Image: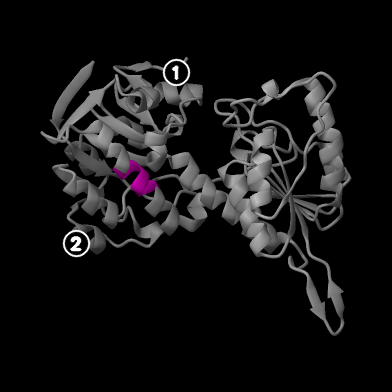
Amino acid sequence: MHEKNSTMIIGVPAELTSNERRVAITPDSTKSILKKGVKKVVVQRGAGHKSLISDEAYEEAGAVMAEDLVDVYAQANVIFKVGRPEGDELSLVKKGHVLVGLLQPYDNDNFLELASTGVTGFAMEKLPRISRAQTMDVLSSQANLAGYKAVLVAANEYSRVMPMLMTAAGTVKAARCVVMGVGVAGLQAIATAKRLGCVVEATDVRPETKEQVESLGAKFIEVPASEGSSDEETKDCVYAQEMSEDYKRRQHDLVSKRVAQADIVITTALIPGRRAPTLISEGMVQGMKPGSVIVDLAVEQGGNCPLSEIDQTRYVNGVAIVGISNLPSSVASDASALYARNLTNFVDVLMDKDSGELRINKEDEIVSGTLVCERGQSLIE
């Protein structure tokens, strides 16, 4: 089924969430989008200021500047956002608008309120993991930055140096870092920790990640197979998933020993649409050395450590537990550039190249995979 609307006019409002510094379009992506045949790009004045992008830079790139949110939503039929519209902004979303962004479709009550506006919503976190969609993969581009920044946050909190130092006064040991979860964020955390001189170990429920870990110079913490087990438990996993009780027990025993020896632990495990799995128990925290640091990248989904608190740093028996949400926003300039490129590539699946018209082709698996609401109904089961 193909649906056509009017010529595409993309609107970019300023993000209103207090901890959101990113913007959905940059001047470079504005130029690229206009070259694709999009009729107009409308950007709210000040939208890029927190990412160090001036209004003049957008105007030089060909964007039309809008004075406020109302003006953006009035002019555009396609809205590019980072976060989901909420509060007063939600009242501006109307039937006929197409909304593209990180829409948090599993946050039921708030998402249903968005769906009820009649908007056609595309949640970029639902992008299918296929080769054709790689250039649109918002989760990967932002997780990469989160993994990098998590190590810097840990270094800032850690009261010692990370690399081994040999001085006339004696030798300083290298910090030991354990990364839990070897997805995009975890791999970048490993690479960053190695560059800073840490001795790095990593663990993941997917045994095939061992090669990736070792290619970065880290050691893979391999959970021994139980008698009669097979790789079926972890076969074809892309994200973290819930494992059997026996696997959890064996993982807990082994990882507990490594965590107790660690100076820094970075946890990155997320399961889409579900609470983050517990990787660091309260008992494991009790066994860690005073001065150790945990950075929990899953804190927005409940955390990989039950002691994590969102946007707080807690100290438990001398162990710092850092739960900063939205780490990509803390490197907003690069995060915005990568996010904007992802959305620029997404334009190709929404636009008829010949006419420049908005086209929603539900036979395209990228379109059907990201479409989460339409005509007042949520499409999330």
Sequence-wise first label, 1 or 2: 2
Main SS of the magenta part reads helix
Instruction: Name the quadrant containing residue 375.
Output: top left
Instruction: Name the quadrant containing residue 231.
Output: top right
* Position of residue 100 in the picture relative to residue 56 (left or right): right
Residue 99 vs residue 314, the one in the foreground? 99
- Measured Cα–Cα span from mark 1 to mark 2: 40 Å
Residue 282 vs residue 226, the one in the foreground? 226
* Position of residue 168 in the picture relative to residue 106 (left or right): right
Give the residue at mark 1: 380
Q: Quadrant of the N terminus?
A: top left
Query: Mark 1: which secondary structure?
Result: loop
- The magenta span reads 339-344
- Whether 20 is drawn above or below 165: the answer is above
The residue at 59%/51% (across/down) is 188
Residue 381 vs residue 206, the one in the foreground? 206
Query: In the image, what residue type sits under mark 2?
Result: Glu
* Position of residue 356 in the picture relative to residue 18 (left or right): left
**Residue 7 percent across, percent down from the top left:** 13, 34
Mark carried by residue 60: 2
- Whether 47 is drawn above or below 37: the answer is below
Query: In the image, what residue type sits under mark 1?
Result: Ile
Q: Residues within 10 Å of mark 2 (few under 14, many from 20)?
A: few
Q: How many marks?
A: 2
**Residue 368 percent across, percent down from the top left:** 35, 22
Q: Residue furthest bottom?
A: 168
Q: Is residue 301 magenta?
A: no
Query: Mark 2: which secondary structure?
Result: helix
Instruction: Name the quadrant containing residue 308.
Output: top right
The residue at 83%/67% (across/down) is 173
